[in-house]
Amino acid sequence: MVRYRLANEGDIPQMTAIRLGVRENRLSDPGWLTRAKWIDALSTSGNAATWVAERAGEVVGFATGRIAEADIWALFVDPRHEGQGIGRGLLARVATWMFGAGVGEIRLGTAEGTRADRFYRRNGWKRGERTDKGEVVYRLQCKVSPPAGSGPGQPTPEPGI
């Protein structure tokens, strides 16, 4: 069984291992991924929230949404746990939180021709232009108007998905 929850500082080593262990979308400079970058991705930052997926106490995936940037900063699943719906569960939680915080459109970029490219298309994201770095931009529109006066607030661990 997979359990989803908000990430905390204690999850940083496992999230880093997953991020550095992926087969596609590898970091060209792993030193870029500092502890400070992770701290900025946690809900305590006020702008972002990261959910982790756990199986038997082990973090097997994570996803981060950022409000000010209106983007998905990261979504990665341990290669040993791919194809089991974990990415969909993480993506749904982040998108629900971001839309609930008033974001009208979420963006992300990924390399063309990858599993991620196909994943986002299959999950209802609209494929768009390419960036200067050669990534494909995807967008997801909020289908429901956010409540008046909504703002980033604090994410809820289980946003009703």
Image (tube, rainbow, N blue to C red):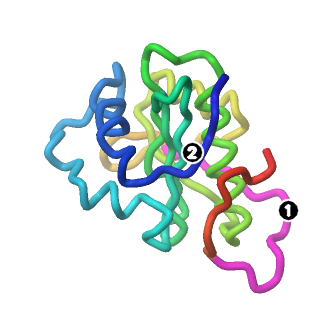
Q: Which residue is at 14% across, 45% downward?
A: 31
Q: Nearer the viewer, residue 20 or 109?
A: 20
Q: Using a 10 Å C-alpha cutoff, classify the residue at mark 2 as few (fewer than 14 neighbours), some (14 to 19) or many (20 or more).
A: many
What amino acid type is highlighted by mark number 2? Tyr
The prevailing secondary structure element of the residues shown in magenta is: loop
Q: Is residue 21 left or right of residue 145?
A: left
- Percent of width and height locating residue 132: 32, 49
Image quadrant occupied by the N terminus: top right
Left or right: residue 52 compared with residue 20: right
- Going 76% across and 58% down the picture, which residue do you hit? 142
As for residue 140 lying within the magenta part, the answer is yes
**Marks 1 and 2 close (CB-CB < 8 Å):** no
Task: Report the front residue among 124 and 147.
Answer: 147
Q: Label 1, secondary structure: give it.
A: loop
**The magenta segment:** 137-151
Vertical comparison of 79 with 11: above or below: above
Quadrant holding the C terminus:
top right
Amino acid type, callout 1:
Val
List the residue tagged with mark 2.
138
- As drawn, the residue found furthest toward the front would be 57
Q: Is residue 135 magenta?
A: no
Residue position marked by numbered label 1 in the rendering: 144
Residue drawn 84% across the image and 69% down it: 145
Report the residue at 72% width, 37% height from top. 124
11 sits left or right of 13 in the view: right
Q: Residues within 10 Å of mark 1 (few under 14, many from 20)?
A: few
Q: In the displayed image of the protein, which residue is found farthest to the bottom? A: 149
Which corner quadrant of the image does residue 128 belong to?
Answer: top right
